Amino acid sequence: MNIAILSGKGGTGKTTVSTNLAMTLGISYVDCDVEEPNGFIFLNPFIQKSEDVFVGYPVINEKECVLCGACAKACQFHALAKAGKEIVVFEKLCHDCGACQIVCKSNALSYAKRSIGKVESGTSKEIQCFRGILNVGEPMAVPVIRKLLKELSSEDHLVDCPPGTSCNVVTALKYVDAAILVTEPSEFGLHDLKMAVELVKLYNIPYGIVINKDDGKDNMVKAFCQKNEVALLGTVPYSMEAAALYSKGIMLCQDGNHKKNFINMAQKIKEAFAW
Amino acid sequence: MKIAISTTGQSKESQLDKRFGRCEYFLIYDTETQEYKAVSNNGVSSQGGAGIAAASQVIDENVSVIITGNLGPNAFELIEKAGIEAYSCEVLSAFRAIEMFQKNQLETISSAGNSHQGMK
């Protein structure tokens, strides 16, 4: 079983909830927020394996190229352009679709590979940890997320997703069986939560909500859960003490009261997802 | 000779748009026929590579000169390789910008600006 942790709004506590739940449940943690993977700061695993992620890009053979410009016209991503006596390749914009190679009548176009990031795995305490890292300056995260999730074993995994509802999250959700949406009781949190709920619904998977920075009152997120009959799987209280532990890189589940809270949350998740 | 100006509208009175890749229109002035033609910028609705789309379009229109505000790195590379001269201008009506170019009052764009400057 793979469970996605997503949020819509950034900074609501996806990584806090996923690292603590992974430790509490004793299942592996997968950080696919590859633009800024930060779960390893808390889990601090010993890295045993690191592999580059490669993507293709077109290379023009100038001797064969007749400058017809068909490749540039075929490219939907503007990765190729004809300028003067040259076809200019913008390799970062290439989606590796192969259209340019198909339309080239002069056989002047081949594909080469370049690395855009890496996938790492290791062990922390008793759990397996995985993460993808996108190199700084690279615009496309999807190939890294795909490689990371495609190669997971059939065991149980908690998948810490990127924020938002972009291609990156859409890709991650293709590999999961259930989803936990982490939010905060603020207008921004609720606004983006609604978008995340709409996205998750498309996958026909069970899902529920965890409220972080919960004020303990009947707030707008609780009202949303009731109105829309979405399971509230747990809350993490808004407290100076939680913030202080976090700032030192200490996991909440290592602390007595918080530990009980995450055990309860884990139990509710198992019930909600019939797992 | 053809001159392309990045503009917000389709007439010669339209204001120059300092954004190249994300401008609404290119107003193309032919110095021989003294006629204006407006074309919609393909880059404006592009998800990425707007500067490349816009540059490819003006290259296909066979212009020799571009008058705009700034050029991003990708657009600059293409314009330079295509041998097109690029000039920087303040926000003025298109015909005033052409007058200034013809009187040699505009500065050449000799280096690329930052990427994504034209995003709204």
Image: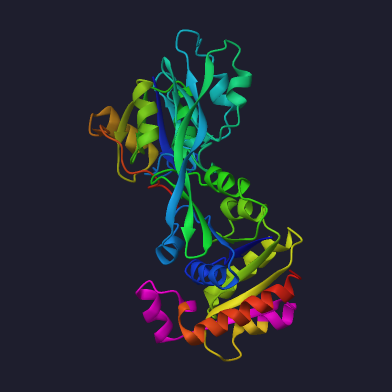
Compared with residue A81, is residue A12 higher up or lower down, i.e. above or below?
below
Compared with residue A142, is residue A263 higher up or lower down, i.e. above or below?
below
Looking at the rendering, the stretch of residues picked out in magenta corresponds to A224-253
- In terms of image quadrants, where is residue A221? bottom right
- Residue at 33% of width from left, 44% of height from top? B114
- Verify whether residue A37 appears in magenta: no
- Residue at 34% of width from left, 25% of height from top? B80
Out of A173 and A193, give the one closest to the viewer.
A173
- Give the x, y percent position of residue A203: 73, 58
Out of B83 and A233, give the one closest to the viewer.
A233
- In terms of image quadrants, where is residue A27? bottom right
For the N terminus of chain B, the quadrant is top left
- Give the x, y percent position of residue A196: 63, 65
- Residue at 63% of width from left, 76% of height from top? A266
Out of B30 and A251, give the one closest to the viewer.
A251
Compared with residue A234, is residue B22 higher up or lower down, i.e. above or below?
above
